[in-house]
Amino acid sequence: MGTLSMRRIPWWRFTMSCLGITLAAFCVSAPTTAQSTREKQAPRAMVAPPSFAPIVRRVSPAVVSVAARATKEMLAGSGQEDDSKEPLFGHSSGFIIHPSGLIITSDHGTDDSGQIAVTLAGGQTYQATVVGRDASTDLALLKIDAGRPLPTVRWGDSRALSPGDWVITIGNPHQLANSVTAGIISAVGRADTANPLIDLIQVNVPLNHGNSGGPVFNLNGEVVGINRSISPKSSGIGFVISSATARGVVEKLSRNERIVRGWIGLYATSSDETFYDVASRTRISGAQVVSVTSDSPAARAGIKEGDVIIRVRGQPIRRLVDLSREVARAPVGTVANISIVRDGTHMALQVLVDESK
């Protein structure tokens, strides 16, 4: 059997070898200053929780089902059968915002018959009364008397949402109460061409008939939207009323205030593109006036056909929908500062806001 011979290594070679190994290990393990800086500056990735169940358990007690006597028109396109031998009922969702029993739901899911029933998550059903309705934003406020304080949810800020954010909805699709679905924000700032006053959020969340009026939650369990409609042309595309729009309307309804909106009396182009101003040889964003109603606030303020409105009450006007919303939000009887561009000249006008006709 052979033996393994050991050759004497000079001490200085051994020291240098160890130093080389140490430096190599340091170079491999220690990040460079630039790499370390990049890692510190890189945003932390937000991922979906392993389960939405904790959020659902916390907020679902405040989600309700709403059944109202419906007309045939209300049921049109809803997928419900029209049996003339039986009362017609429309089914939607809602959520409790005050322990006394104040409930938000969709306006198109209610009526004036006084035959509205609300079923809580626990299965108890109560007769509801209509506190107020606003057809323009498709919102209704109901009231039930449960004889006890009820669980509620809190508002969130829809303006903080971005495409890609996770959202959860709970509702009553096809009368399947307490159904939970989840998905992401597809787009923000959508507008309904038939009603530009509603600020809509586009979501990629499975929604069905009966989800209308139900809450949309962020990952903090806050209501950031209210389900309004689904796309008839594509599955998986839904539209949600932003909490920024809904909250102010609901607060007024709860105080029994009449919902009024501003009006100045003009028509503008429906194009959302920028306009080329020949005089200044520049492109400007805004809404171009097509016509002005005679003896209207706009006419008295000196607004003319062809003017491009670029700001209202300090807010930039980039699209026609921006103009409609800012004028509607302006308190009736107040003076609104409006900035325009006319033949390359910037002008500031003051318009006394009237009530929408």
Image (cartoon, rainbow, N blue to C red):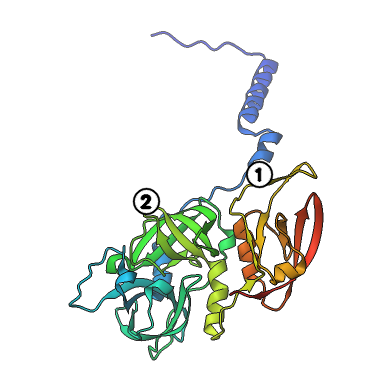
In front: mark 2 or mark 1? 2
Q: To which residue does mark 2 refer?
A: 233
Residue 129 location (% of width, % of height)? 40, 86
Q: CA distance from mark 2 to mark 1?
A: 45 Å
Q: Residue at x 47, y 64 (%)?
A: 217
| Residue that protrudes farthest toward the bottom in the picture | 147
Q: Nearer the viewer, residue 225 or 129?
A: 129
- Residue type, numbered disc 1: Lys
Tell me which label, 2 or 1, sits earlier in the chain. 1
Which part of the image, by quadrant, shows the N terminus?
top left
Disc assigned to residue 141: none
| Within-10-Å neighbours for mark 2: few <14, some 14–19, many 20+ | few
x, y percentage for residue 79? 27, 63
- 347 lies left or right of 295: right
Residue 118 seen: yes
Rendered residue at 50%/70% (across/down)? 137
* Residue sitting at the far top: 2
Label 2 sits on a secondary structure element that is loop
Q: Residue at x 71, y 71 (%)?
A: 297
Instruction: Name the secondary structure under disc 1.
Output: helix
Residue under pointer 1: 40
Q: Residue at x 53, y 77 (%)?
A: 250
In the rendering, at what x and y percent does residue 30 appear? 64, 34
Which image quadrant is residue 119 in?
bottom left
Q: Residues within 10 Å of mark 1 (few under 14, many from 20)?
A: few
Q: Give coordinates of residue 177: x percent, y percent.
A: 30, 70
- Residue closer to the observer: 120 or 244: 244
Going by the numbered disc 2, the residue's amino acid type is Lys
